[in-house]
Structures are given as structure tokens and as C-alpha cells.
Image (cartoon, coloured by chain):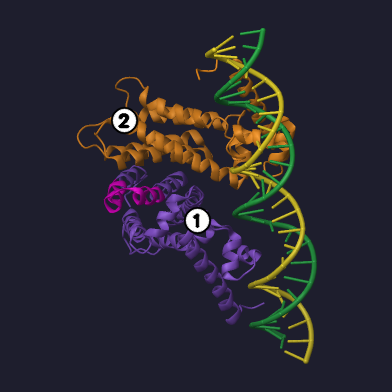
Chain colours: A purple, B orange, C green, D yellow
Amino acid sequence: MTVPTGRRERKKAATRQKIADTALRLFLEHGYDAVGIRDVAAEADVAVTTLFSHFASKEALVFEQDEDFEHRLTQAVTGRAPHEPLILALRREIQALVRHCTGDGAAPIWRMIDGSPALRQYEESMRLRHTESLATAIAADLGLARTTTACRTIARFVIDAFSLAREAPDPETAVDEIFQMIEAAWGVTRPSEGA
Amino acid sequence: MTVPTGRRERKKAATRQKIADTALRLFLEHGYDAVGIRDVAAEADVAVTTLFSHFASKEALVFEQDEDFEHRLTQAVTGRAPHEPLILALRREIQALVRHCTGDGAAPIWRMIDGSPALRQYEESMRLRHTESLATAIAADLGLARTTTACRTIARFVIDAFSLAREAPDPETAVDEIFQMIEAAWGVTRPSEGA
DNA sequence: TTCCAAAACACTAACGGTTAGTGCTACGGT
DNA sequence: ACCGTAGCACTAACCGTTAGTGTTTTGGAA
């Protein structure tokens, strides 16, 4: 009834991690499409149903830490330094996220993602979820100083910046370019004073 | 070898239409998830494989005329009156498209779409395709007057406007609000003179 | 008219992701 | 020491989708 104190949680986390690691290894070795769920389960030495009790879908195995993305963005809004402009904080965070994705360590994974329509589609709808919570965070931060539509629009533009920059030849410059546009868009929403 | 002159094409189109109509009817009657591909095929009196030779997926049955959307947007760019500002033309077209989707005739279909995660996800990735061709059309219209990134960004913002407005309580006002933001974003991309 | 190549269509069977149903086992709290 | 819960396993299936194969229809050529 109370919070489980430890071992069970650790075991569960270990199983989850083992599945995720095994999946990623197999995917990178043989290609995402060439590896079946049954292969992953067998290699991780768990039952298929166990795998699906930890991950909602095959694609979710690849985007294991998607909550991180969501959390970092909302945190960039709610936890920024006092008086720091909203858009500036978001720009810094997106810049960091893009840098992380295009770094050497993550490159093979993203190459795999870009090569699979199923994964790209999954990523898009994942980002859409992130957009919702970012919009909520922005709206909460601003109180009633902006329209709901304006908040949702800005949230989506910010997420767009990530996707667009990631695909651009020079991601970091692209972030700057897009955020100039976002800044301008943000500017015209002010009902009274600037951010 | 040459272009088929008629009857064959008509028959093919008729089959396609019959499948689409049957599918939509069944989906609206019993719900999208409750109707299987085998049901649709049986009711339309075709084989499952025939159905899939006309439509790439189950979701595609619902978005039968998706090319229309794509075509109308690119046409709004390339076929607009001389000297008409790009963004204005796009705003008018998006306004029309939103009006059409929220009209009484299409309402049940969109309610069904909003109720099914699979359909929402499919729609999103469909819009992403549309974004690409819109970006291409915009880039072609502008020549080298803008960055590729700027064109792709604006294209995506315009598609976003459609999605966001469709979900807003007052869609038409939302289009206006979002397009004010797009206009501002567009403004800061000018390398020399306005559009 | 007759014949041919292509395209539409059909059928069976299967593949791969996903889930329901059922039950066992191990852990943590009492 | 005991019990409820949660993690896990197994089977069997559902559903969308595709490969393989063969049949009919159609438009054009001989």
C-alpha cells in the first residue's frame, strides 16, 4: 500500500533497462525493421507480454527517455531565473537539446530514426504531446496575460524549432534563425507589456 | 502502353469510391476502431488485397482526398494574384480550409478523427508531407530571397495554424490571431525588401 | 476479328505488433 | 508466518498488412 521501499523497484527498473538496452543494441546491429519484438524479448530473456508491460509499443523502446525532453522544456519555463525573458530561456534549452541530439554519441540512433517512417511518425506524435504540456506551462507562467491560442501557438513553434533545426545542415544557426522568427511572433501577442 | 481511354479508369475509380464510401459509412455507424478491414472489404464486396491496392492503409480510407489540401495550399502560393502578399494568400486559404472542416457536413468525420489516436497520428504525418510541398512552393516563389530554413519554418507555421485553429473554440478568430504572429515572424526574415 | 500485354481483382496464407486471459512466483507489509 | 499485490510468464488469438499466385477484364495491335 505504501511506497515500495526498494528492491522491487530496483528489479523492475533493471528489467526495463535491460529490455531497452537489448532493443537498442539489436536495432543498431541489424536495423529497426529487421528486428522483431519476439527477437528483443528472447534476447532480453523476458516474455513478450512483459516487454509490453514496460513499453507501450515497439517505437517506445527507442524513445526510452522521452519524458526527459518534456521535463526539460517545462522546467526551462517554470524554473528560469527571475526576470529572464521566456523566449530566451526556451531558446537556450532548445539549443542545448539540439546540440545533444546532433552530438556524436546520439548520431547513430538519430540516423536510425530518420531511416524508419514508423519511428519518424512516432516521434512527431510524441512531440505533439510535449507541445501540450509546454503550452500548459507557458499559460501557467503568464497567467491571463496571453490568449490560450497564443500560448499553444508559441509552444508549437518552439517544438517546431527543434524538429526543423535537427534536420537543418547547420542546426545551431538554424535554431537562432527560427527563434528570431518566434521572438517576432511572440512580440505581437502582447496585450499590454513585453515578456 | 498509351493512356487508357476511359472505361477502365472509370471502373477503377468507381471501385475506389465504393470502398471509400462503404468504409466511411461503417466507421461512422460503428466507430473507427470497431470496424475491421475485413468488414469493410466484405461490405464493399471486394477482396482485402484489392482494398489495399486502392488505399495504402486503413487510415487512408478516412483521408481520401488529402491531395486536395496539399494542392490548394501550393496553388494559393503559385496561383495568387500578382503583387498579392504571400502570407495574405495563405491566410485566406487556411481560413477557407478551416471553415470547410468545421462546417456541419464534415463535423461528424472530424469528431471521429479526434476520437481516434491512430487517425490523429496519421493526420499529423500527412500534414508533415503537406508541409514539405508547401515549403518547396514557397521557396520556388521567392527564389533566393529567403533562406531554406526560413521557408520551411513559415510553411510549418502555416500548417500549424490549420491544426491549432481547428481545435480552437472559435476557429476563425484563431486563424486571424495565429496569422498575426506568422506575419510578424515572416517580417523578420526579409533580407532586403518586404513580400 | 482475333490475340496479346497489362492491369485489376481475387484467394490463401502468412508475418509482425499487440492484447486478453490465466496463472505462478516473489516481494513487502502486517 | 501470512497475505495481498505486482511482476512476470505462457498460450492463443486479433488485426493491419503483404507476398505469392492465379484469374478475369480491357484496350490496343496484328
Return the residue nearer the eye: C1 or B51: C1
| Percent of width and height locating residue A80 | 35, 63
Q: Kindly report the distance in space between the C-alpha atoms of the residues bearing marks 1 and 2.
A: 36 Å
Query: Is A103 rendered above or below residue B114?
Result: below
Tell me where the magenta segment starts and ends, as one range.
A159-180
Return the residue nearer the eye: A155 or A111: A111
Does the magenta-highlighted stretch encompass residue A167? yes
Residue drawn at point x = 32 percent, y = 38 percent:
B151
Question: Mark 1 sits on what residue?
Answer: A32
| Percent of width and height locating residue A27 | 49, 60
Place residue D6 in its image quadrant. bottom right
The secondary structure type at the circle numbered 1 is loop
Compared across the picture, whether B140 is left or right of B60 comes to left
Question: Mark 2 sits on what residue?
Answer: B140
Q: Quadrant of the C terminus of chain B?
A: top left
- The amino acid type found where label 1 is placed reads Tyr
Return the residue nearer the eye: A67 or A132: A67
Answer yes or no: are tags 1 and 2 on the same subunit: no
Does the magenta-highlighted stretch encompass residue B116? no
- The amino acid type found where label 2 is placed reads Ala
Q: Chain of mark 1?
A: A
